[in-house]
Amino acid sequence: MDSNRGQGGIQLLLAAEQEAQHIVNAARNAKLARLKQAKEEAEKEAAEFRARLEAEFQRKVAESSGDSGSNVKRLEQETEAKIHHLKSEADRISHDVVQMLLKYVTTVKS
């Protein structure tokens, strides 16, 4: 009878060990599934964040492109105005400069 009871105790221990192994495996699988889910959620959040930053960057590029076009136009107008001013000044004083050069070229120093 003791051997039956001993045999039954061993069978009980083996069954308990198998049940414990099933519980550990289930917990391990649940942990792996949760880690995979967390990784997917993190990747999704990162992609959304990246898309939001990219959209903001593109918006700023578009704004600055519009501004640069107006800046280019403004700079071209300023340049044209300066060129016109320099030409008018050159026309105004060219006769005096020619006279001064002729005076220095024709004057002989001893």
Image (spheres, rainbow, N blue to C red):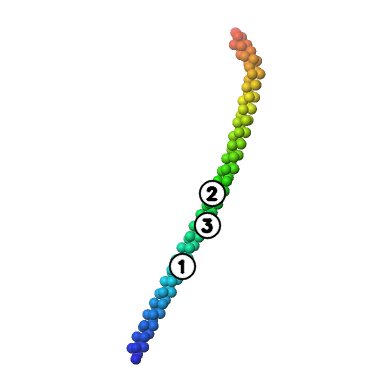
Of mark 3 and mark 1, the one earlier in the sequence is 1
Q: Residue at x 36, y 83 (%)?
A: 10
Q: Quadrant of residue 73?
A: top right
Which amino acid type corresponds to the residue marked 3 in the rendered image?
Glu
Which amino acid type corresponds to the residue marked 1 in the rendered image?
Lys
Q: Is residue 16 above or below residue 37?
A: below
Of mark 2 and mark 1, the one earlier in the sequence is 1
Alpha carbons under labels 2 and 1: distance apart: 34 Å
Question: Picture coordinates of residue 8 (x, y %)?
Answer: 36, 85
* Circle on res. 45: 3
Which amino acid type corresponds to the residue marked 2 in the rendered image?
Glu
Q: Quadrant of the N terminus?
A: bottom left
Q: Quadrant of the C terminus?
A: top right
Dot 3: few (<14), some (14–19), or many (≥20) neighbours within 10 Å? few
Q: What residue is shown with label 2? A: 54
Of mark 3 and mark 2, the one earlier in the sequence is 3
Question: Picture coordinates of residue 81 (x, y %)?
Answer: 64, 27
Q: Quadrant of residue 20?
A: bottom left
* Circle on res. 65: none
Which is nearer the eye, 101 or 19? 19
Residue 100 appears in the figure: no
Q: Quadrant of residue 22?
A: bottom left
Residue 32 appears in the figure: yes
Question: Picture coordinates of residue 32 (x, y %)?
Answer: 44, 66
* Circle on res. 31: 1
Dot 1: few (<14), some (14–19), or many (≥20) neighbours within 10 Å? few
Left/right of residue 68 with respect to residue 25 in the rendered view:
right
Question: Picture coordinates of residue 75 (x, y %)?
Answer: 61, 32
For label 3, the SS is helix
Which is nearer the eye, 55 or 32? 55
Q: Residue at x 43, y 74 (%)?
A: 23
